[in-house]
Amino acid sequence: MNKFKSLITIIIVVCLTNNLSAQETYIPWKNGKLVVDEGNRYLKHENGTPFFWLGETGWYLPARLNRDEAEYYLEQCKQKGYNVVQVMVMNTMPAINAYGKWALPEGFNFENIDKKGEYGYWDHMDYIIETAARKGIYIGMVCVWGTPVQQGKMSTADARKYGEFLAKRYKDSPNIIWLIGGDIRGDVKTEVWDALANSIRAIDKHHLMTYHPRGRTMSGTWFHNEHWLDFNMFQSGHRRYGQRKGDGEYPIEENTEEDNWRFVERSFALEPLKPVIDGEPIYEDIPHGLHNPNEVKWNDDDVRRYAYWSVFAGSFGHTYGHNSIMQMKKDGIGGAYGAQKTWYEALNDPGINQMKYLKNLMLTFPYFERVPDQTVIAGTNGIRYDRLIATRGNDYLLVYNYTGRPMEIDLTKISGNRKKVWWYSPKDGALSYIGEFDNKVTGFSDDDGYRYGKDTVLIAVDASKEYISSDWDSLPDAQEKLKK
């Protein structure tokens, strides 16, 4: 009965929200297609409108959700501020969806893929993409997950045929971002990934493309100079500090597993400069290290820390994930990695509902001038959870503090003889004015003590600027400005 009620609730909500969606929806590509900005750090639309990628991890959306469920899920993503949903177009080979339809009924021969009177696998994929488009959401398409490719189920010739099919089918869809790879190192089946990427790019020259790599690795390690790689993606992964099981030859420095900001710095050290994003950090409600369900699970303050660390270090956006949602767990279906909740119950968890505050913060200030700048932190910075991450524009600076520890901030790093300062809460978007300060190194701490998960953002602005007001208790919706 509970399962029946849950599904009825989904259908009712879909019906209620459908009538509201069109008038409330911000359609980003009305500003033109996505391109890399002139500074090679961020994404923007052709007319110059900034694009902050706020991604949701819906890997199993094409395989496990029917039309009504997909509609409900995508509407919830829209309402929560997400503008990208990352999916696996084929999670296995052969791949089958919720309607019992196969992705490759004749192998990699796509000549008769659309059968009259039949709602096939690719019709359902079309529906997902079109539904997302109505809601102003991009679909980050992992064309095929890495595991079946590693198992030899797609040859180089197959990859070319598949890439050509995908590009012809979706080149005119406004909301596609291509993700080559799929949780796999780029030095495994490299020739297959190159063939897939090049076959898509030969036909579709309008949509951005990157590579989704294995945990604790980055696309730029193998493909940085490939013409098809528009921006770098890394997977900081799901390990806690010191967890190494199953990693083989360790790809990063010891005891830095949670320091996802290091990948951003590593990407920016490559030439030429390209934008970068954490495409798979730790997921909310998933065990540390993934594989042992008895381990402690990552929670909302962990996913906030990963998001703010990465973005303040210079990423052009961030992708969130939830254990139950990424696998679209239903009663009797899914449940890997110790997942207990259904995907629709997990939509109420705190972390998925807190990411919008990061997006709103970043769009509040001049966007393209922003740079990471650790010199804003006076003296010696902390390590691990005590690490402060600073970013600034010409006349504003932001500092993320995960533990609430006292900090010394160099206010001279931005313009202005006087600075107005606020606290901003990543948990609920609350804004609290502290006061006006002299232009010098100044100490800041709040009255709530020191502990993990007591995260906050310090905002300092040239007192002559009016980006935010001292009497505000929250930030207005910055996206409203983009609609005008």
Image (cartoon, helix red, strand yellow):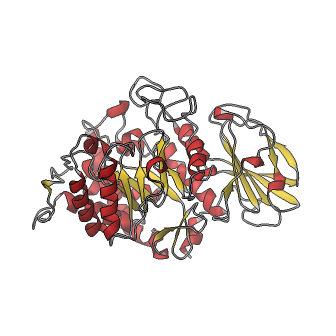
Residue 121 at x, y = what percent?
19, 57
Left or right, 450 with reference to 234: right
Q: Quadrant of the C terminus?
A: bottom right
Looking at the rendering, which quadrant does residue 443 occupy?
top right
User: Where 315 falls versus 204 (above or below)?
Assistant: above
Residue 197 rendering spot, x and y as whole percentages: 34, 59
In the picture, measured across the screen, residue 121 lies left or right of residue 452, that is left
Between 269 and 276, the one nearer to me in the picture:
269
Q: How many marks?
A: 0
Residue 11 showing in the rendered view = no
Image quarter for residue 126?
bottom left
Q: Residue at x 13, y 65 (%)?
A: 111
Whole-percent x, y for residue 482 in the image: 56, 71
- Quadrant, the N terminus: top left
Residue depicted at 18% across the width and 47% down the height: 94
With respect to residue 238, does 479 lie above or below? below
**Please, is residue 293 above or below residue 16 in the view?**
above
Which residue is more in the foreground, 373 or 118? Answer: 373
**Which residue, as the protein is rendered here, is positioned at the far top?**
294
Horizontal relation, residue 274 to residue 171: left or right: right
Looking at the picture, tell me which residue is in the foreground, 230 or 130. Answer: 230
Asked whether residue 222 appears in the rendered view, the answer is: yes
**How far across and down, in percent of the image, does residue 118 sit?**
11, 62
